[in-house]
Image (cartoon, rainbow, N blue to C red):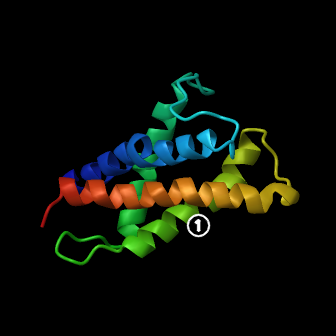
Amino acid sequence: MLRLSLFFVAGFLAVPFFHQPVLGLLHALAVVPFAPFNLSPTSPLGVPALLSASFWGGLWAVVMLLVLRWQAHTPQPWIKALLFGGIALTTVALLVVFPLKGMGFDPAQLPGRFLIGFLVNAAWGVGTLIFVRVLLPR
């Protein structure tokens, strides 16, 4: 149980320390119109968007690290974490989360949205591994 909790903490922390800075860079380059570290309340509970994203980052970290069968004594699966974050999380966001939030599904915007999602979510995946490596050393 402690191990799963530390997986959650690693993914939670990867959002503000990896995901959001990449989003900030994309915002600074005018690639995305929204700024990182959004503290606006989200529906339905009214929690800040950053806290919500961090919570979901923690849950996804548990899933990712269980799927990758992460162990402290094995080499780090950096490419797998990068691809898991970049592909799995982005696909779920585009096909499930965006439609649930009323953002719709526009096939014409899919390549651009996928690339942006891949970048921020891949950063989260790598960041999660960095944090879990620190929290659960060999």
Measured as percent of width and height from the top left, residue 2 is found at 20, 51
- Farthest bottom residue in view: 75
Badge 1: how crowded within 10 Å, few (<14), some, or many (20+)? Answer: some
Looking at the image, residue 37 sits to the left or right of residue 77; the answer is: right
Residue 23: image quadrant is top right
- Farthest left residue in view: 138
Q: For the point 48% across and 48% down, which residue is it? A: 19
Q: Which of the two residues, 66 or 21, is positioned nearer the viewer here?
A: 21
Residue type indicated by callout 1: Ile
Give the labeled residue for mark 1: 87
Q: Which of the two residues, 39 or 98, is positioned nearer the viewer here?
A: 39
Q: For the point 49% across and 42% down, which residue is it? A: 20
Looking at the image, residue 123 sits to the left or right of residue 135; the answer is: right
Measured as percent of width and height from the top left, residue 112 is found at 74, 58
Q: Is residue 136 above or below residue 51?
A: below
Q: Is residue 110 above or below residue 97?
A: below
